[in-house]
Image: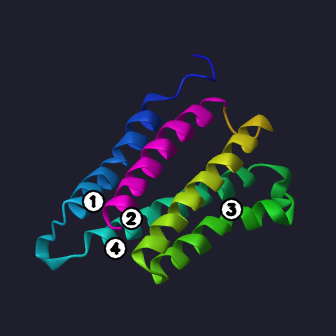
Amino acid sequence: MTTDVIPRPALLLGWAGVIPFALLTAASALDIHPWSLDMTMALRAYGACILSFMGGVQWGILLPRDAGRAPFSRYLISVGPALVAVLCLLISNGAGLTGLIAGFLALLAYDIATVRQGLAPRWYTSLRVQLTLAVVALLGITLLARL
């Protein structure tokens, strides 16, 4: 197996993580409110969790390297997505969705740079591009539907 091939568990679980984005986008766009829930807020909350998780992946990449001596900026960048995610929960739906879109795209750019530096496997770029484009599209659909 080459390092360009996305491991099946990562591919399947990654795409499984997109399913809630799709369901919540559909519910929000169609103005469906089961149990009187705000589906746009639910989407923002799920997006915030995933963005935080993706930042945590960067922290995990740092752990086995340099015995904790990675540059401070790399650690800071790894917690940045969680800080952005919390902010996106505290502001309006439109601004929160826009912030999540920006956060996912910025983290994608950083993840690609991480792979180019040889800190993550080559397949990670392909997986992140696929999943990020899907997530950003779904968040964008919700944003447009809620205007």
Label 3 vs 2, first from the N-terminus: 2
Q: Quadrant of the N terminus?
A: top right
Comparing labels 4 and 3, the label whose residue is closer to the camera: 4
Q: Earlier in the sequence, mark 4 or mark 3?
A: 4
Q: What range is drawn magenta here?
A: 122-147
Instruction: Give the spatial CA distance, label 4 vs label 3.
Output: 24 Å
- Nearer mark to the viewer, of 3 and 2: 2
User: What is the distance, in whole Å, between disc 4 and disc 2 at their CAs?
Assistant: 9 Å
- Nearer the observer, disc 4 or disc 2? 4
- Return the residue at label 3: 78
Residues under numbered marks 4 and 1 in contact, where contact means CB atoms less than 8 Å apart: no
Q: Which residue is mark 4?
A: 41
Q: Earlier in the sequence, mark 4 or mark 1?
A: 1
Q: Residue at x 53, y 71 (%)?
A: 85
Please name the amino acid that badge 1 sits on: Leu
Considering the image in quadrants, where does the C terminus appear?
Answer: bottom left
Label 2 crowd (10 A; few <14 / some 14-19 / many >=20): some
Cα separation, mark 4 vs mark 1, equals: 9 Å
Q: Position of residue 27 (x, y in %)?
A: 21, 60
As measured in the structure, the alpha-carbon distance from the residue carrying label 2 to the one carrying label 1 is 9 Å
Disc 4 residue type (three-letter):
Met
Residue marked by disc 2: 46
- Circles 2 and 1, Cβ within 8 Å, touching? The answer is yes
In the picture, the disc for residue 24 is: 1
